[in-house]
Image (tube, rainbow, N blue to C red):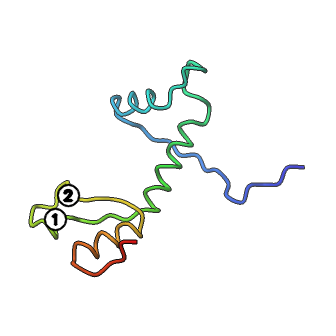
Amino acid sequence: MRRPDIMRPVKLTTTLPEDIRALLDLHLYSPLEERVPKGAYQAFFIERIREFFDTKTLDLSLYCRVPSRGMTVRGSAAAINLLNDMLRGSNYDQS
């Protein structure tokens, strides 16, 4: 007997601009299957959403004295904290 999933899937429907959908289709396309494999969209979106929530953003404009538009970097919390400390001139361990 199959055990129920603890995290049940919930249906989500959305639309994308044609150019973005075309890029996504090209990225996920499998030459072996000659199509986008079953579950590829779901796996892609879950990975991107987890990546979004597992990373932090740092606005570099605070250190560069430029408008903030487009001056952000994103990475793991540890990497962003290290970069922030380095930019503030804090001592950090280079080992």
Which residue is more in the foreground, 74 or 88? 88
Which residue is more in the foreground, 9 or 33? 33
Q: Residue furthest bottom?
A: 91
CB atoms of marks 2 and 1 within 8 Å? yes
Residue occupied by mark 1: 61
- Left or right, 54 with reference to 35: left
Which residue is more in the foreground, 20 or 95? 95
Q: Looking at the image, tell me whether mark 2 or mark 1 is earlier in sequence order.
A: 1
Q: Residue at x 55, y 22 (%)?
A: 35
The disc labelled 1 sits on which kind of residue? Ser
Estimate the x, y position of residue 80 in percent, counting from the top left.
Answer: 34, 67
The disc labelled 2 sits on which kind of residue? Met
Q: Quadrant of residue 55?
A: bottom left
Residue 71: give its label: 2
Q: Quadrant of residue 84?
A: bottom left
Estimate the x, y position of residue 64 in percent, counting from the top left.
Answer: 12, 65
Q: Residue at x 56, y 43 (%)?
A: 43
- Left or right, 23 with reference to 43: left
Residue 49: give its label: none
